[in-house]
Amino acid sequence: MPDDPSLALSAQDCLVAVMVAVSASDEDIGTTELIKIQAAVNLLPIFAGYDADRIKVVSQMVFDLFEQEDGLDALFGLVREGLPERLHETAYALACDVAAADGTLEETELRLLEEMRYELTIDRLHAAAIERGARARHLT
């Protein structure tokens, strides 16, 4: 990917990209996942002042990257560049919430979450706690 400054993502863009990536990973973006992403952007303090219209732009970027051979690596590169380390666990928590939103975790979603833990250097115990919280919030 070229070093085009217009491709730089804000921290909020990175969080949206991570949520969209998890949702798109199983090639079936469900309504509950879309609602979860929209609700996070509308309600969480980290998104205060964020232009919700950016969701569409960031989503399209994720879809475009997923069509490329090294797209996932490129996505993680952009996320590592634009997301401060203090928000890595936030990104993982949001990704887990989106993955759990529809009540099922597909193998592709689990693999992406595993890759995300590695790429964002999420401690195993912290990851387990985040996952447990997401599971508890989405029980029916």
Image: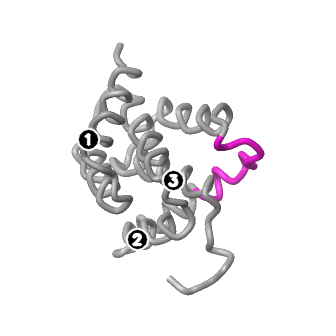
Q: Secondary structure at mark 1?
A: helix
Specify which label sits upstream in the sequence, 2 or 1.
2
Q: Which residue is mark 3?
A: 86
Residue at horizontal 36%, vertical 51%? 25
Q: Are marks 3 and 2 in contact (CB under 8 Å)?
A: no
Q: Earlier in the sequence, mark 3 or mark 2?
A: 2
**Residue 53 placed where, x, y %?**
73, 49
Residues under labels 2 and 1: Cα distance?
28 Å
| Mark 1 → mark 3, Cα distance in angstroms | 17 Å
At a point 55% along the width and 57% down the height, the residue shown is 14
Q: Nearer the viewer, residue 78 or 54?
A: 78
Give the residues drawn in magenta, as a range: 46-58
Residue assigned mark 2: 71
| Secondary structure of residue under mark 3 | helix
User: Can you give x and y, in whole percent of width and height, for residue 124 in the image?
Assistant: 25, 46
* Residue 129: x %, y % from top left: 31, 33
Which residue position is annotated with label 1?
Answer: 125
Residue type highlighted by circle 2: Gly
